[in-house]
């Protein structure tokens, strides 16, 4: 049972480059989300999806795009990387959006933009 | 106003002692869930314990228990008989049930260091 799989684990980008962070879950979870974690702060929501074909913005969506063509996959695209996007990114999934349901997290992607 | 407040940026505790990590929250929803996650130095986020707003009893999971005081809007994590492996960042988070975008709202975390 793989849970939530994130790739890559580490990435260095040059300013202006684009890339896609991959996220896949095998638990048939409807709700998926992307967070970023910066030093001294809790996680902040970038984008989320409540099901295939449905995505919405979170707290810090600028500079990122997402799509959800299948239940399993939820990639995060950085359109034109900026140093401010240096962070640790987590993908998480949940069986349901409801308040009783916690998240299963991927192992994270440490991104550095130079 | 912050919705989740963790007032202890860091704590040192002697091994085998109990430790309480503080968390207060702010919500006007009647239905919400409170979660604690552990993040060791390796970076992964590990779910520890959950408390629902309608749960009458405090949640327990092994050495972890949650001291839930609804009127005070606090949800403190208690770790009994601490171990060296408990050294990590601990995050309190809340998921509201109404008028939200279903996100988990996070506190800034508490860094716990267990001393041998």
Image: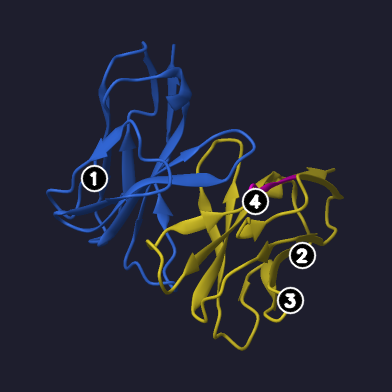
Q: Which label sits on residue B90?
A: 4
- Could you tell me which secondary element the residue under label 2 belongs to? loop
Q: Nearer the viewer, residue B87 or B7?
A: B7
**For the residues bearing labels 2 and 1, Cβ distance under 8 angstroms:** no
- Could you tell me which secondary element the residue under label 1 belongs to? loop
Q: Which label sits on residue B80?
A: 2
Q: Which of the image's four quarters has the C terminus of chain B?
A: top right
Q: Rate crowding at label 4 as few (under 14), some (14 to 19) or many (20 or more) other CA atoms within 10 Å.
A: many
Q: Nearer the viewer, residue B92 or A64?
A: A64
Structural distance between the alpha carbons of marks 2 and 4: 15 Å
Structural distance between the alpha carbons of marks 2 and 1: 38 Å
User: The chain coloured yellow carries which letter?
Assistant: B
- Going 75% across and 45% down the picture, which residue do you hit? B9
- Could you tell me which secondary element the residue under label 3 belongs to? loop
Q: Earlier in the sequence, mark 3 or mark 4?
A: 3
- Going 44% across and 11% down the picture, which residue do you hit? A114
Structural distance between the alpha carbons of marks 2 and 3: 23 Å
Q: Rate crowding at label 1 as few (under 14), some (14 to 19) or many (20 or more) other CA atoms within 10 Å.
A: many
Q: Which residue is mark 1?
A: A74
Structural distance between the alpha carbons of marks 3 and 4: 21 Å
Q: Which of the image's four quarters has the N terminus of chain B?
A: bottom right
**For the residues bearing labels 2 and 3, Cβ distance under 8 angstroms:** no
Query: Residue B104 placed where, x, y %?
Result: 47, 58
Q: Which residue is mark 3?
A: B72
Q: Rate crowding at label 3 as few (under 14), some (14 to 19) or many (20 or more) other CA atoms within 10 Å.
A: few
Q: Earlier in the sequence, mark 2 or mark 3?
A: 3
Query: Residue A20 placed where, x, y %?
Result: 25, 29
Structural distance between the alpha carbons of marks 3 and 1: 38 Å
| Chain holding disc 1 | A
- Report the mark closest to the observer, 2 or 3: 3
């Amino acid at each position: 049972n793989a849970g939530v799989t994130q790739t890559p684990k580490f990435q260095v980008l040059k300013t202006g480059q684009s890339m896609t962070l991959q996220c896949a879950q095998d638990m048939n979870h409807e709700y998926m989300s992307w967070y970023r974690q910066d030093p001294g702060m809790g996680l902040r929501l970038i984008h989320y999806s409540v099901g295939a074909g449905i995505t919405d913005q979170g707290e810090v969506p600028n500079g990122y795009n997402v799509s959800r063509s299948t239940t399993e996959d939820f990639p995060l695209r950085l359109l034109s990387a900026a140093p401010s996007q240096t962070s640790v990114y987590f993908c998480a999934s949940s069986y349901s959006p409801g308040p009783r349901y916690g998240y299963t997290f991927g192992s994270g992607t440490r991104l550095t933009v130079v | 106003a912050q919705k989740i407040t963790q007032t202890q940026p860091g704590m040192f505790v002697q091994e085998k002692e109990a430790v309480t990590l503080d968390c207060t929250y702010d919500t006007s929803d009647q239905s919400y869930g409170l979660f604690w996650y552990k993040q060791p130095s390796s970076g992964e986020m590990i779910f520890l314990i959950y408390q629902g707003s309608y749960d009458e009893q405090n949640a327990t999971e092994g050495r972890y228990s949650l001291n839930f005081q609804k009127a005070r809007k606090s949800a403190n994590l208690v770790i009994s008989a601490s171990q060296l492996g408990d050294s990590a960042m601990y995050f309190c988070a809340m998921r509201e049930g109404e008028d939200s975008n279903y996100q988990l709202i996070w506190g800034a975390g508490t860094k716990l260091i267990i001393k041998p």
